[in-house]
Image: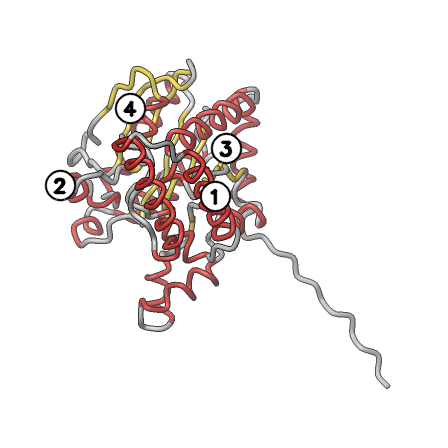
């Protein structure tokens, strides 16, 4: 995997321009054997200042764009960097092996665990084969089968969430898409082993939740987690996906929003400029966070772990009604 990005988002124009100038000076310095370190350092400072200024005032829609960045590290990148001796497990023993969900055994920081995650693919061919990370029912059946396997052998489970949503095709619905996801929610809630879930990019609807019922739910700083994509919400409310930025605002889908609502447990900081600008640092940060939470959750008794997990999800969306005191008659 190559780290760093040459693809700039629309609002990153000034950053991309400065980075291009820095690269141009470095190239000229190397070929002409001229010392331009002073100019390069000055431009780098300006670039960092511009990044801080832009990223300090990102809108929810801009965060969605960052979460979808083509150079953002994917589940397979995390597996390559932090999962030792990974052994992929295939199939749902019912229909077929869905490549949009990857499962397997491995070790994170020496800790044996089951890995489950959405797979989007990198090349055009891989993306098509993985259905752009939109899993079919067989993908969620595969995921649950491997989680039950992990429970049997008392292995913790780590899931990486990165999908715009479950595949909504006719075939998927005929094979019980909604039922399979609902069953995953029920069965994951009762797992006796530790479960850690991380939203590393997109967290769309039931497709994300289908592998996301966990003891600890974590999100990268510029990822999003929502009941529907901004485009889908805009199409329903205003009959036009052009209103996606407005939908992203009202959906409250950012990691910061969800931490404030106590839906997630921690926001994992990303390098300045987003995970796509320094994937290696991002992935190592995620590894450290996973191990920390695994240690804390593993210290609980299985019965207490299940009870806390169940209570955690029961509390989501809770509200308190307050009745105004009746005004006294004049």
Q: Position of residue 114 (x, y in %)?
A: 35, 23
Q: Earlier in the sequence, mark 2 or mark 3?
A: 2
Residue 173: x and y in percent read 22, 51
Instruction: For label 2, count other residues whose C-alpha is less than 10 Å away and answer few (under 14), some (14-19) or many (20+).
Output: few
Q: How many marks?
A: 4
Tell me residue 64's x, y (percent).
39, 52
Q: Depth-wise, is mark 2 or mark 3 nearer the camera?
A: 2
Depth check, front residue: 148 or 233: 233
Question: Mark 1 and mark 4: span between their CA atoms?
Answer: 39 Å
What's the CA distance linking mark 2 and mark 3?
35 Å
Disc assigned to residue 215: 3
- Label 1 or label 4, whichever comes before in sequence order: 1
The residue mark sitting in front, 2 or 1, is 1
Question: Seen from this angle, which residue lies furthest right?
Answer: 330
Snapshot quadrant of residue 62:
bottom left
Find residue 48 and name its label: 1
**Disc 4 target residue:** 104
Report, in whole angstroms, how far the alpha carbon at label 2 lies from the one at label 1: 35 Å
From mark 2 to mark 4, how far is it between C-alphas? 22 Å
């Amino acid at each position: 995997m190559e780290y760093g990005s040459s693809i700039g988002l629309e609002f990153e124009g000034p950053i991309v321009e400065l980075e291009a100038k820095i690269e141009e000076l470095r190239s000229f310095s190397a070929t002409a054997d001229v010392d331009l370190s002073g100019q390069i350092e000055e431009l780098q400072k300006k670039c960092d200042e511009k990044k801080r200024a832009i990223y300090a005032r990102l809108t929810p829609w801009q965060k969605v764009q960052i979460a979808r960045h083509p150079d953002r590290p994917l589940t397979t990148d995390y597996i390559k960097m932090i999962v030792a001796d990974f052994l992929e497990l295939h199939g749902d023993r019912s229909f077929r092996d869905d490549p949009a969900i990857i499962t397997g055994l491995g070790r994170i920081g020496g800790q044996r665990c089951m890995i489950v995650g959405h797979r989007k693919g990198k090349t055009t061919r891989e993306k098509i084969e993985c259905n752009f990370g939109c899993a079919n029912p067989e993908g969620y059946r595969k995921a649950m089968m491997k989680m039950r396997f992990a429970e049997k052998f008392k292995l913790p489970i780590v899931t990486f969430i990165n999908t715009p949503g479950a595949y909504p095709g006719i075939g998927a619905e005929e094979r019980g898409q909604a039922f399979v996801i609902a069953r995953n929610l029920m069965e994951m809630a009762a797992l006796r082993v530790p479960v850690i879930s991380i939203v590393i990019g997109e967290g769309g609807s039931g497709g994300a939740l289908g592998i996301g019922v966990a003891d600890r739910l974590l999100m990268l700083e510029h990822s999003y987690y929502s009941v529907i994509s901004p485009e889908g919400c805009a199409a329903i409310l205003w009959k036009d996906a052009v209103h996606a930025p407005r939908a992203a605002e009202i959906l409250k889908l950012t990691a910061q929003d969800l931490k404030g609502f106590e839906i997630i447990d921690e926001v994992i900081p990303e390098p300045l400029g987003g995970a796509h600008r320094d994937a290696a640092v991002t992935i190592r940060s995620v590894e450290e966070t996973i191990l920390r939470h695994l240690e804390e959750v593993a210290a609980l008794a299985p019965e207490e772990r299940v009870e806390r997990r169940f209570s955690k999800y029961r509390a989501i969306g809770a509200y308190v009604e307050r009745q105004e005191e009746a005004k006294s008659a004049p």
